[in-house]
Image (cartoon, rainbow, N blue to C red):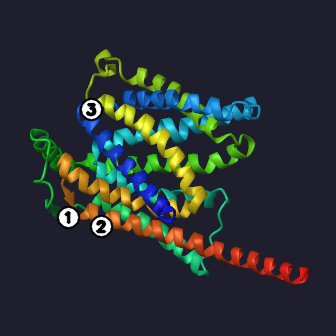
């Protein structure tokens, strides 16, 4: 049973992300301002994580130099505040399915950024390098298909809805989005959001070397992001009614994204990476797309088009090409280590 635990955990992780896409989309469709949503989400995450960070890492944490604090402030603004604000605008103009689909291009974007910063190396003449290049091309092709090609609409599941009149409203909005320029704008904003998130992943590797307390680092970033997002929200939204949280989908979305997504999945992802490695976790990303695609059609009445399906497949293929290339590059290193270990054991005998 213990062998199957990582498989169960990655399914839970992707189910949490799928619910995040659905709840965020539902909150925005019910009129919640996306900038206010980001502030509340990051505040909830900060409140949730602070006791754990203080209890587990406060005594063992290294000192925090001012220069490192400034770097953390910068990557918090780029990778969290800006990324989430842009993501909210993109989600309003597109769909939960598209949001789940574009997350599959995050490893490709991260690899491309690492290549520019010379953290990664691309050897096109090798099988691994060719696979990673093919992954980048497939990702670009999938993104272009999502943005510019609609095709026939697939309404196989849209009549099994549970939200009554809300379904009809969403169905009408889906037709408007698919036929308007807002869909194209939303696609590119979603990719821009993932690009900022990829920059955060790449730049954070340099921060962790100087400040290895990961839980405190995450909590500090959530706190700084909540301040930054508050400033942005106050500058954009002056209507006090938009800041009210009642017992509705807005409150549920805020608490869920702040606690479950930022808090719970942080621990679960760390556990999976420790047990099976980051590649195993990344390969499970398409599960969130499948869950979101089915759930959004049934619950939100979103209409899936052929272009969205083909574009999503392109992004998933790009993901797997890059992951295969990365694993292929790591194989010779592992084999060399095994050979060296065997040689040492023979000499010891």
In the rendered structure, are the residues bearing label 3 and label 1 in contact, judged by CB atoms less than 8 Å apart?
Answer: no
Q: Is residue 178 above or below residue 282?
A: above
Marks 2 and 3: which is nearer the front?
3
Under circle 3, the secondary element is: helix
Marks 3 and 1: which is nearer the front?
3
Q: Calculate the distance from the C-alpha at mark 2 to the C-alpha at mark 1.
A: 10 Å
> If you read the primary sequence from the N terminus, does the residue marked by circle 2 or circle 1 appear first?
1
Q: Position of residue 120 (x, y in %)?
A: 65, 63
Q: Position of residue 314 (x, y in %)?
A: 37, 67
Under circle 1, the secondary element is: loop
> If you read the primary sequence from the N terminus, does the residue marked by circle 2 or circle 3 appear first?
3
Under circle 2, the secondary element is: helix
Mark 1 lies on residue = 151
In the rendered structure, are the residues bearing label 2 and label 1 in contact, judged by CB atoms less than 8 Å apart?
Answer: yes
Q: Residue furthest top?
A: 240
Q: Residues within 10 Å of mark 2 (few under 14, many from 20)?
A: some
Q: Residue furthest right?
A: 348
Mark 3 lies on residue = 249
- 349 lies left or right of 225: right
Residue 66 lies in what quarter of the image? top right
Instruction: Name the quadrant of the C terminus.
Output: bottom right
**Tag of residue 61:** none
In the rendered structure, are the residues bearing label 2 and label 3 in contact, judged by CB atoms less than 8 Å apart?
Answer: no
Mark 2 lies on residue = 310
Residue 274 showing in the rendered view: yes
């Amino acid at each position: 049973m213990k062998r199957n635990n990582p498989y169960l955990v990655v399914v839970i992780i992707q189910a949490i992300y799928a619910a995040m896409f659905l709840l965020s989309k539902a909150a925005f469709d019910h009129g919640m301002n996306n900038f206010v949503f980001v502030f509340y989400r990051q505040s909830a995450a900060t409140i949730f994580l602070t006791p754990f960070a203080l209890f587990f890492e406060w005594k063992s944490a290294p000192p925090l130099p001012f220069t490192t604090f400034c770097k953390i402030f910068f990557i918090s603004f780029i990778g969290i505040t800006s990324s989430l604000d842009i993501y909210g605008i993109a989600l309003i103009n597109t769909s939960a399915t598209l949001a789940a689909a574009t997350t599959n291009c995050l490893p490709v974007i991260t690899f491309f950024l690492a290549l520019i910063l010379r953290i990664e190396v691309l050897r096109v003449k090798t099988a691994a390098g060719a696979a990673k290049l093919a992954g980048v091309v497939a990702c670009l092709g999938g993104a272009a298909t999502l943005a510019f090609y609609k095709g026939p609409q697939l309404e196989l599941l849209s009549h099994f809805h549970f939200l009554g009149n809300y379904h009809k409203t969403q169905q009408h909005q889906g037709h408007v989005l698919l036929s308007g320029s807002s869909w194209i704008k939303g696609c590119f904003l979603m990719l821009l959001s993932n690009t900022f998130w990829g920059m955060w992943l790449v730049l954070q590797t340099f921060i962790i070397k100087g400040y290895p307390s990961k839980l405190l680092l995450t909590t500090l970033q959530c706190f700084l992001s909540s301040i930054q997002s508050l400033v942005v929200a106050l500058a954009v939204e002056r209507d006090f009614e938009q800041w009210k949280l009642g017992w509705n989908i807005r409150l549920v979305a805020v608490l869920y994204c702040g606690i479950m997504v930022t808090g719970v999945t942080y621990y679960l992802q760390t556990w999976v990476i420790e047990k099976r490695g980051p590649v195993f976790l990344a390969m499970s990303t398409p599960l969130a797309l499948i869950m979101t695609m089915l759930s959004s059609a049934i619950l939100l009445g979103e209409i899936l088009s052929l272009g969205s399906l083909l574009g999503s497949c392109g992004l998933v293929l790009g993901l797997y090409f890059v992951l295969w290339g990365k694993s292929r590059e790591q194989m010779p290193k592992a084999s060399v280590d095994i050979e060296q270990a065997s040689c040492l054991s023979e000499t010891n005998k």
